[in-house]
């Protein structure tokens, strides 16, 4: 079964923090690079952070120093700790393999993050 389930979003004031979680089915998760993506209203989906199966990490320049990606292979879960949030971080956040599973034809429901100024 193919599954991606994101959670942890919400409404937060600028400067606040949130921790997102994403649980994936084995088909998608292991041993692949996993990523967090986000899509703001009227904009294309963009890559936020990625983590390889061996733990290699990189980030979009816009979130470096504020966001931290991690993964728990036993739980098939990837996390995104977001600190010092800014209004421009407002978006629906998704996780997926990198490159996206099934050429991007499958996505979870995402989790909404809204940062108020």
Image (cartoon, rainbow, N blue to C red):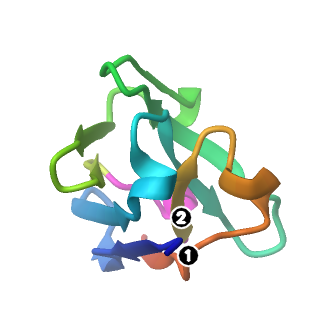
- Front residue of 79/30: it is 30
In the rendered image, which quarter is residue 57 located in?
top left
Question: Which residue is disc 1 drawn over?
Answer: 108
21 versus 99 height, above or below: below
> How many numbered tags mark residues here?
2
Residue 63 lies within the magenta run:
no
Rendered location of residue 60, percent (x, y): 56, 31
94 versus 66 height, above or below: below
Q: Going 28% across and 74% down the picture, which residue do you hit?
A: 8
Point out the frontmost of discs 1 and 2.
1
Can residue 45 be seen here? The reply is no
Can residue 39 be seen here? The reply is yes
Q: Which stretch is magenta?
A: 85-91
Crowding around mark 2 (Cα neighbors within 10 Å: few <14, some 14 to 19, many 20+) is: many
Q: Secondary structure at mark 2?
A: strand
Q: Secondary structure at mark 1?
A: loop
Q: Contact, CB < 8 Å: mark 1 with mark 2? A: yes
Residue 86 lies within the magenta run:
yes
Q: Going 35% across and 55% down the picture, which residue do you hit?
A: 85
- Front residue of 19/21: it is 21
Q: Going 53% across and 64% down the picture, which residue do you hit?
A: 94
- Give the side of residue 99 with respect to residue 116, left or right: right
Rendered location of residue 103, percent (x, y): 80, 52
Rendered location of residue 58, percent (x, y): 46, 22
Numbered mark located on residue 94 in the image = 2
C-alpha span from label 1 to label 2: 7 Å
91 versus 71 height, above or below: below
């Amino acid at each position: 079964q193919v599954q991606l389930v994101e959670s942890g979003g919400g409404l937060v004031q600028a400067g606040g923090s949130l921790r997102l979680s994403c649980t994936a089915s084995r088909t998608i998760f292991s041993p692949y690079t996993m990523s967090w993506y986000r899509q703001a209203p009227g904009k294309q989906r963009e890559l936020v952070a990625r983590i390889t199966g061996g733990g290699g990490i990189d980030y979009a320049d816009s979130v470096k120093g504020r966001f931290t990606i991690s993964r728990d292979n036993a739980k098939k879960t990837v996390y995104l700790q977001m600190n010092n949030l800014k209004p421009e971080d407002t978006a629906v956040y998704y996780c997926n393999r990198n490159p996206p599973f099934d050429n991007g034809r499958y996505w979870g429901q995402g989790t909404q993050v809204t940062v108020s100024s």
